[in-house]
């Protein structure tokens, strides 16, 4: 995550996380460390995976005290091993203790997503199909979770509702049909925006294609239906497969020949990567 994005978008969210964890004071730390004292602590990986969020991890401590120094021995996107020393953090011991949980929460969550995404993306290598995320993210964590997907080798779908036109079942119902929904979107949305339509049946696929949709999402269709849909579309629109996509079935879906496979599991079902801060000791 670049420095500009960090300052403009992430800093505020990180501060909110810190305020949630320290509403008035860190009673435990203040009880045992009564005044400023320099210290150092190791950052250790406790299982194999893909690391993501190191910049966010470091930023937690910098926001508490800009003099805190983080020395890293790996970069986002690196595959790390159990027992590996990832880095060291030096600074006021009170800052290291008070920021530990928030910093690790970000790093563990983001690394877990990157690890899960990497394992899924590898199944699509050589297929021409791209793996994309969804908006099924944790509230106030989207910027971090979608970044972690990219680190893991996935691609971003629209970031939020302002980012693109996706006409889902309820939009279509509100508009009165596929053709009418696409027509209204064409009239309203800027010409630079592509229009994607969610379809659940082959009849809807035909309607969306005839209406001029740029992208047609095949939602919760059987493999046979999706193959037929791709044949009907025949390259006249881009195709996206969606609905209950997991690491276990993604390889089979890629064989159908869609352009994109979107998976909410990348962000809502990835387990954390176990990482800890250990061996805190005084340092001059």
Image: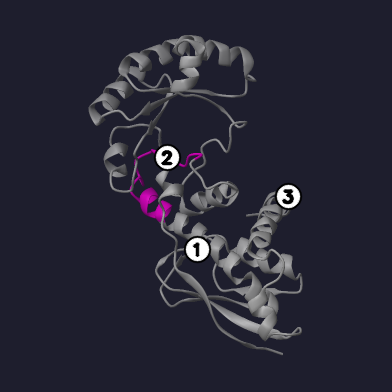
User: In the rendered image, which residue does mark 2 sit on?
Assistant: 130
Q: Which residues are magenta?
A: 116-135
Q: What is the spatial separation of the Cα atoms under label 2 and label 1, in whole angstroms?
A: 25 Å
Say whether disc 1 or disc 3 marks the residue closer to the N-terminus: 3
User: In the rendered image, which residue does mark 1 sit on?
Assistant: 108
Q: Is residue 36 above or below residue 210?
A: below
Marks 1 & 3, CB-CB < 8 Å contact: no
Say whether disc 2 or disc 3 marks the residue closer to the N-terminus: 3
The residue positioned 44% from the left and 68% from the top of the image is: 274
The residue positioned 72% from the left and 52% from the top of the image is: 4
User: In the rendered image, which residue does mark 3 sit on?
Assistant: 8
Say left or right for 41 vs 130: right
SS category of the residue bearing label 1: helix
Say left or right for 99 vs 239: right
Where is residue 109 shown, x and y percent of the image? 50, 59
Q: Is residue 248 above or below residue 52?
A: above
Label 2: how many residues lie within 10 Å, few (<14), some (14-19) or many (20+)?
Answer: some
The residue positioned 50% from the left and 63% from the top of the image is: 108
Indicate how the structure is coloured in the image. one colour
Residue 214 seen anywhere in this rendered image of the structure: no
SS category of the residue bearing label 3: helix
Q: What is the spatial separation of the Cα atoms under label 1 and label 3, in whole angstroms?
A: 23 Å
SS category of the residue bearing label 2: strand
The residue positioned 32% from the left and 38% from the top of the image is: 254
- Quadrant of the rendering where the N terminus is positioned: bottom right
């Amino acid at each position: 995550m670049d420095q500009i994005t960090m300052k403009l978008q992430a800093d505020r969210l990180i501060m909110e996380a810190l305020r949630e964890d320290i509403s008035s004071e860190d009673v435990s730390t203040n009880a045992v460390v009564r005044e400023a004292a320099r210290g150092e602590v190791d950052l250790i990986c406790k299982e194999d995976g893909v690391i993501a969020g190191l910049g966010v991890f470091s930023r937690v401590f910098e926001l508490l005290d800009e003099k805190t120094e983080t020395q890293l021995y790996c970069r986002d996107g690196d595959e790390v091993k159990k027992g590996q020393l990832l880095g060291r953090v030096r600074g006021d011991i009170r800052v290291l203790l008070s920021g530990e949980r928030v910093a690790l929460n970000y790093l563990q969550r983001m690394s877990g997503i990157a690890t899960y995404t990497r394992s899924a993306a590898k199944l699509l290598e050589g297929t021409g199909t791209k793996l994309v995320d969804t908006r099924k993210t944790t509230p106030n964590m989207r910027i971090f979770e979608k970044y972690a997907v990219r680190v893991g080798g996935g691609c971003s779908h629209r970031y939020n509702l302002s980012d693109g036109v996706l006409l889902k079942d309820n939009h279509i119902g509100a508009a009165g049909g596929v053709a009418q929904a696409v027509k209204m979107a064409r009239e309203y949305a800027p010409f630079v925006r592509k229009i994607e339509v969610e379809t659940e049946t082959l009849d809807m696929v035909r309607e969306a294609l005839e209406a001029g949709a740029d992208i047609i999402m095949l939602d919760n269709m059987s493999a046979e239906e999706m193959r037929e849909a791709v044949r009907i579309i025949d390259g006249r629109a881009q195709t996206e497969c969606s609905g209950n996509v997991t690491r276990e079935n993604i390889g089979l879906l890629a064989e159908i020949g869609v352009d994109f496979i979107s998976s909410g599991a990348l962000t809502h079902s990835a387990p954390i990567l176990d990482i800890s801060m250990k061996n805190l000791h005084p340092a001059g």
